Amino acid sequence: ESIVEAGNEIKGMAKKILSPKDMIKNAKKETFKEAQSRQKVNEFELIQIYKNYVYIFYISIAFASVLFSFLIYKLFFKQEIITSLSLLVFFVFCLASAFKYSFRSFQIKHQKLCSVQEWWNRPNEWFPPLK
């Protein structure tokens, strides 16, 4: 019984991951202003949040650069595979964080809950400026 239950749970997770159309179809639709009022964020707080996201983005990029340099050194000069793999994990984590905060700051700057595709189509805005 518990095996069938676990199997059904795994099947449900796989369906969510492999067929995002259902998730998108059932997603809540709201505007940026509606989300802002729902979270009770005023304009001044929004500016502060934007600045914080930009700072976190640049810190993530800086850490990613240092980790990448160290990764190259450990992989090619010291030939330490295990250390290189752990550095790679942290490097990817920093890049994911940089993406997240670049995308969120893009949404705040344009005051629009846009898709990643819109962000991707504007590479000149991947590195957010400080206001």
Image (cartoon, helix red, strand yellow):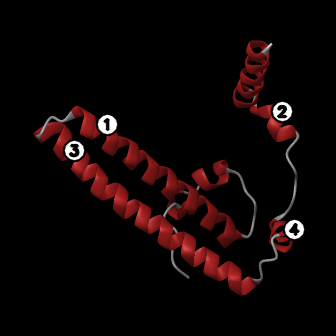
Residue 34 is marked as 4
In this rendering, the label closer to the viewer, 4 or 1: 1
Amino acid carrying label 1: it is Leu
- Whole-percent x and y of residue 21? 80, 33
**Whole-number angstrom distance, CA of label 2 to CA of label 4:** 23 Å
Query: Where is mark 3, residue-wise?
Result: 72
Say which of 99 and 63 sits in front: 63
Question: Which quadrant would residue 4 be assigned to in this image?
Answer: top right
Q: Classify mark 3: helix, strand or loop.
A: helix
- Does the CB distance between marks 3 and 4 fall below 8 Å? no
Binning the other alpha carbons within 10 Å of mark 4 as few (below 14), some (14 to 19) or many (20 upward) gives few
Q: Which residue is pictured at 74% across the width and 16% down the height?
A: 7
Q: Position of residue 113 (x, y in %)?
A: 75, 60
Mark earlier in primary sequence (2, 4): 2
Label located before the other in sequence (2 or 3) = 2
What residue is disc 1 on? 85
Query: How far apart in space, not on screen, are marks 2 and 1 (Cα)?
Result: 35 Å
Q: Please state, as top left, top right, bottom left or bottom right, where the C terminus lies in the image.
A: bottom right
Seen at 43% across and 61% down, the residue is 60
